[in-house]
Amino acid sequence: MKNTASTLLKQKQSGEKITMLTAYDYTTARIEDECGVNSILIGDSLGMVMQGFDDTLPVTMDQMVYHTKMVSKGAPNAFIVADMPFMSYQVSIEQAVANAGRLVKEGGANAVKLEGGAEVCDRIKAIVDASIPVVAHLGLTPQSVNVFGGFKVQGKTYEKAEKLLNDALKVQDAGACAVVLECVPSKLADIISKSLLIPTIGIGAGNGCDGQVLVYTDMLGMTTGHTPKFAKIFADAGQAMKDGIAAYIEQTNSGAFPSEEHTFSIDDEIIEKLKKGKLSS
């Protein structure tokens, strides 16, 4: 069954947890969809995971449309959410609606995600008024990394915790269908989740959220360098890939690969005729 904003809301109402993972290509999306994940996020995290940048800021709209198109083709059942990259919605309401429309019309997204609270509520409302579902994103918003001074937990003082709660209520009132809470203390995320009618999707925000999202390379042990505290490795695919590649190199060098079972046959008479023809010429 196709996952939608409505089915995710019903999961919150029934107490059934929502699962979300990132994907950036057809093959990964197909595997995740076949496993039954509820939602797939084409995150602007692709700037770090796929492109090797230190943050998400260099990602462009054209790149988001391109990756969203691949993911949507591979995942017919998941609720497809595409990130709106840095400066794709900040300049004007009109720009925000137009770019959101591209992700849906060209990319095949079912919803878009944008970062921010009260300051982007006019964007959220305008996009929703254009019949495009919006997922909000609060807490650690990676596009604001330069303002935060790094990737840090948010909402640890009373004033900041109160602002996060108020922002969550405001984006809900603006029409958001869900809220991602990133790097928020678990007790605060629990209060926010219980205060909202719409689902909360946590990443580093505890199990009081209505669902969870992880970057798939983190949860499969494929991340190099620093791994976030909240990222549990569920299967070490990274080491499995290294083992497989090392075995391929070794067997190719030794001549063990390709073996007979990996080759195609031809009638020996044809080979003999070719040899004779070559010799006679």
Image (cartoon, helix red, strand yellow):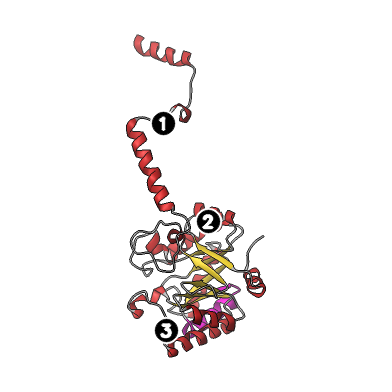
Q: Circle 2 is placed at which residue position? A: 29
Q: Are marks 1 and 2 in contact (CB under 8 Å)?
A: no
Instruction: Name the kind of residue labelled 2 in the image.
Output: Ala
Q: Circle 3 is placed at which residue position? A: 156
Label 1 – label 2 distance at C-alpha:
30 Å
Q: Quadrant of the N terminus?
A: bottom right
Percent from the top left, x then y, of residue 134? 55, 74
The answer to whether 252 is drawn above or below residue 272 in the figure is: below
Horizontal side, residue 79 vs residue 251: left or right:
right
N-terminal label among 1 and 2:
2
- Residue 94 has which mark? none
Q: Secondary structure at mark 2?
A: helix
* Chief secondary structure of the magenta portion: helix
Q: Is residue 264 visible?
A: yes
Q: Around disc 2, counting alpha carbons within 10 Å, would you say few (fewer than 14), some (14 to 19), or many (20 or more)?
A: many
Instruction: Name the kind of residue labelled 1 in the image.
Output: Pro
Q: Is residue 281 visible?
A: no
x 56%, y 79%: residue? 193
- Magenta stretch encompasses residue 127: yes
- Residue 258 has which mark? 1
Residue range in magenta is 117-134
Q: Secondary structure at mark 3?
A: loop
Label 3 – label 2 distance at C-alpha:
35 Å
N-terminal label among 1 and 3:
3
Instruction: Name the kind of residue labelled 3 in the image.
Output: Lys
Percent from the top left, x then y, of residue 200? 55, 75
- Magenta stretch encompasses residue 200: no
N-terminal label among 3 and 2:
2
